[in-house]
């Protein structure tokens, strides 16, 4: 095999064995899996997700080997990946890798779970596939770079290849076939940020389709369907067409030595990750200075450029989902409630108090924050109190980052909260489900994660 | 509704009625439909197409309301669009619109037929939907421009929106919902040329996925799934991300007055359209000067830049499909046989005679040809004979262009030839099928086009 960056990355993904993965990385993969399950369940009942699920029911088989987590139905792997992928990202509670600005869980787990259930894969192979998906997808996101992210939703684009890596690993693709799968995934890769200014429903479509398209690429490659061998770095590949600062060296950065999965952050607030550093800094400013919302005159969030690009267009959010991309709304909820969770957004994103606070929040590009981004997401705010004080606060590692991560207890509680919020499962059911999730790597065969429909206590 | 270019184009596609379409345009739409059926049947038995069909059989329902033309099976509309779309483009015999460098039939008809059969639409509604797909897709291809086509396969990208327009028209989307469908289609739009240098299988994947993705967008929009309202011209839309010369004025160019469908060319040779002008010019040079292949020392094809971009990397074709992107191979077959059809490529693309001729063919950028492109595809060759003569020839309208179009008899014969070549149907079956195709606009309900499996004479 030619030793192009794409080929080296594909060979790594195809060859990764459970035994090669350091134990802390395995454990973090399980953490991320459990955390993801919460996000997939949180999508239940959300209008765009239910529309995608209805489409799957109309176009796909009535049942199959792969589970639809929120509805507890089943279908073929393709539709399970599509529906679970759509569900996973809509609550904005799924994980994120800072350096690549990529949400791996929402695309990797739906594809991996669908194939693992269809093939009755072992928990160890499932974990190896998931790690392959994270390692590939994160490096591809880094390769595509900041210029890509200005226009494209990296989770949709790099996500198709991440899903292909995970699905392909579970299908036992050899390195050449994995490279074919990368080619077919990359030539399907899509997702534009344009939807955001209209508060349109595209985000769950991006994750659902990335998971499904990567899965398609892997199954086709298993049957001998060939793809471009340099879909990433080639002269007519993704980097050439969809980036102006693509760096092929990132594709193979310390493969097998650096574990990018372990750099992935959990989301604590239920909003776009670009709001989190400032949210944590605001919380710190209020705690350190014993402030309430009524004390605050105005807030300036000192941010990186990508925060301005993504959040800037959202000036008066029209929906819960769009509010999660409003810096002013998120900081308002933090100021009012000390938290910005699912319930706070759902129940009051446009209350007079929050809408009024929102108008008093500005974003400003900060040189230090911007220079550190995307490797580090530093939080800085400057605020003026109503009684004339100027207060600044700073958080080096926002809550959920590897340096300030969630404990297993916090993840467990987060997942229970998400399932309860969406009514995807009641507490007794989650008592049954969570131990199964936490021990996934010891499963002989990956089976259904959720109780059968109607089987649990009411 | 806001009167953006995207909104105006969506409103046109949603509102187009059969009665609004001039009769010559209706007739040309029927010509293109019959011509397309030949290409869809020609995909039968071609390895990558059969892999896609096997994937559909594995992931989709065992039968459904929509027909799989080549296999005479059926499935849900999604898989019918996918499989027929993959089949339609692989023989390189489907139509092309010069100005947009877009192959409308391969993406529009698979989506339209799948929905029309599912909804038992009338022939008139089918024709209106097809015209909507052509008119939208061609203008979107023109909007994306030459810079887009250098990296992206316009038939994959613009094709998703063309398919959405056709499917959306059949689903009765109102203008706002059609705009949503455009948004969801555009944010799924993909397809990179990188596969070509590896002779990889991506081209049928592009057309199959464009048809399927457009269909997804339309069904989602019918259920209220929203999309970006300026997916084409917006600051984070397709033009911004995937083109450097996007021109929004092209999106609404003389809607309802200019019928872009009627500008579409039929393919006569079984090769990439970029080879056709030079192929016709070589044929003219040989006929006018009474030359045989043995008389020819060398040939220079005087071409537009896109021909060099697309065909340039193909120096020693490794497969029948890649040979269709080799200028030298195509001209060699013309020189040897007077034609470059399916049989000539299949049986001798790499014979010593053709491979030897191929080495004596060069491409050179020609200012006049390049300036006229893409509105006109002028063919020019200069050749040196073995006995020392310098001969030039020129064709203003390559065979199949509107100024030099195929007659209905020629289309009928082409379709019969393609069906026979792929063994998708025998002559007696095509005697039954072709009258049904030629009268499609008079059907009360669009039903199956092909005889049931095994129903025809053997």
Image (cartoon, coloured by chain):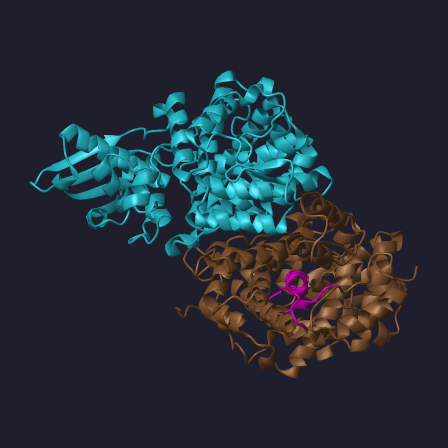
Chain colours: A brown, B cyan
| Foreground of the two, A357 or A173 | A173
In the rendered structure, does residue B403 fall within the stretch colored magenta?
no
Task: Count numbered badges in the picture.
Answer: 0
Residue at (74% x, 40% y) in the render: B224
- In this view of the protein, can residue A360 be seen by the observer? no
Q: Taking A184 as reference, is B160 above or below it?
A: above
Q: Taking B235 as reference, is B269 above or below it?
A: above
Q: Position of residue A179 (x, y in %)?
A: 48, 63
| Foreground of the two, A225 or A47 | A225
Residue at (61% x, 36% y) in the render: B66
| Foreground of the two, A390 or B100 | B100
Q: Position of residue B419 (x, y in %)?
A: 42, 34
Magenta stretch, residue numbers: A93-122
- On screen, residue A246 versus residue A113, left or right, reads left
Image quadrant for the N terminus of chain A?
bottom left
Q: Position of residue B165 (x, y in %)?
A: 60, 34
Residue at (60% x, 74% y) in the render: A260
| Foreground of the two, B433 or B143 | B433
């Amino acid at each position: 095999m030619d030793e192009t960056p794409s080929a080296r990355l594909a060979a790594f993904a195809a060859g990764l064995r459970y035994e090669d993965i350091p134990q802390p990385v395995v454990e973090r993969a399980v953490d991320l899996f459990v955390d993801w399950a919460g996000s997939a369940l949180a999508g239940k009942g959300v209008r765009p997700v239910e529309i995608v699920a209805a489409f799957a029911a109309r176009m796909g088989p009535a049942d199959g080997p792969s589970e639809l987590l929120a509805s507890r139905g089943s279908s073929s792997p393709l539709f399970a990946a599509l529906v679970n992928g759509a569900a996973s990202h809509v609550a904005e509670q799924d994980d994120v890798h800072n350096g690549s600005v990529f949400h791996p869980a929402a695309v990797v787990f739906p594809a991996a779970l669908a194939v693992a259930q269809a093939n009755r894969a072992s928990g160890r192979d499932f974990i190896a596939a998931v790690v392959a998906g994270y390692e590939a997808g994160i490096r591809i996101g880094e390769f595509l770079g900041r210029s890509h992210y200005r226009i494209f939703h990296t989770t949709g684009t790099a996500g198709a290849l991440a899903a292909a890596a995970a699905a392909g690993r579970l299908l036992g693709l050899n390195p050449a076939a994995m490279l074919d799968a990368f080619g077919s995934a990359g030539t399907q890769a899509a997702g534009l940020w344009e939807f955001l200014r209209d508060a349109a429903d595209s985000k769950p479509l991006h994750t659902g389709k990335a998971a499904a398209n990567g899965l398609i690429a892997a199954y086709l490659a298993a049957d001998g369907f060939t793809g471009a061998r340099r879909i990433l770095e080639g002269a007519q590949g993704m980097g050439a067409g969809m980036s102006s600062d693509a760096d092929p060296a990132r594709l193979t950065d310390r493969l097998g030595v650096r574990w990018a999965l372990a750099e992935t952050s959990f989301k604590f607030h239920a909003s776009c990750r670009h709001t989190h550093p400032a949210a944590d800094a605001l919380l710190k400013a209020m705690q350190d200075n014993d402030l309430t919302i009524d004390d605050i005159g105005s807030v300036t969030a000192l941010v990186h450029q990508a925060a301005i690009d993504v959040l800037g267009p959202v000036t008066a959010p029209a929906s819960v989902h769009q509010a999660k991309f409003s810096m002013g709304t998120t900081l308002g909820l933090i100021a009012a409630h000390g938290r910005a969770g699912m319930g706070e957004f759902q129940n009051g994103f446009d209350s007079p108090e929050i809408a009024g606070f929102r108008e008093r929040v500005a974003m400003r590009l900060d040189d230090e924050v911007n220079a550190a981004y995307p490797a580090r997401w530093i939080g800085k705010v400057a605020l003026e109190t109503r009684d004339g004080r100027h207060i600044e606060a700073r958080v080096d590692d926002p809550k959920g980052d590897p340096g300030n991560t969630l404990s297993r207890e916090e993840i467990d509680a987060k997942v229970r909260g998400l399932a309860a919020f969406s009514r995807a499962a009641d507490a007794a059911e989650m008592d049954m489900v969570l131990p199964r999730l936490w021990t996934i790597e010891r499963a002989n065969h990956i089976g259904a994660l959720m109780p059968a429909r109607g089987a649990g206590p009411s």
